[in-house]
Amino acid sequence: MSEVFEMLLFIVLFVLSLSLFACFYRVIKGPSLSDRVIALDSIGINIISITAVLSIWLHTYAFLEIILLIGIVLFIGTIAFSKFIERGVVIERNRNR
């Protein structure tokens, strides 16, 4: 791998790390619950991006399964948070029989 490409990957990792910390700040100081959910979703996307860049940098395909798992868990978490914001519960139980 060329030296310029390695420097570019390092810069990308640095920028993604800054973005990750900005999202952490938004989770802590978010003005509303929906802003915090969006920030958590952005944190997951940043983690996926960092993992993909590390996979390129280390010349391995081993991290691709991890990226898929993070994406699936992120999707399920976003749906659960959305249901909680909308209805106040994640799992609805029908007690009327």
Image: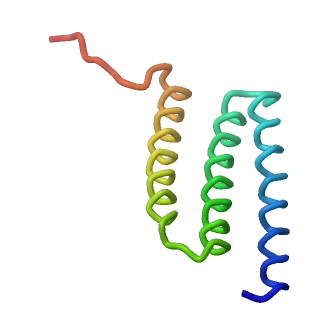
- Along the line of sight, the residue nearer the viewer: 76 or 13: 13
- Along the line of sight, the residue nearer the viewer: 60 or 42: 60
- Along the line of sight, the residue nearer the viewer: 55 or 88: 55
Q: Residue at x 65, y 62 (%)?
A: 49
Instruction: Say above or below: 60 vs 29.
Output: below
**Quarter of the picture holding the N terminus:** bottom right
Residue 41 location, x and y as percent? 62, 45
Q: Residue at x 50, y 26 (%)?
A: 84
Residue 16 location, x and y as percent? 78, 58
Q: Residue at x 46, y 45 (%)?
A: 73
Quadrant in the rendering for residue 33: top right
Q: Residue at x 78, y 89 (%)?
A: 2
Instruction: Say above or below: 97 vs 61.
Output: above
Instruction: Say above or below: 31 vs 58.
Output: above
Residue 23 location, x and y as percent? 77, 43
Residue 84 is left or right of residue 32, and the answer is left
Residue 86 is left or right of residue 32, and the answer is left
Residue 51 is left or right of residue 6, and the answer is left
Residue at the bottom extreme of this rendering: 2
Quadrant in the rendering for residue 93: top left
Residue 47 is left or right of residue 97, and the answer is right
Color theme of the render: rainbow
Residue 28 location, x and y as percent? 78, 28
**Quarter of the picture holding the C terminus:** top left
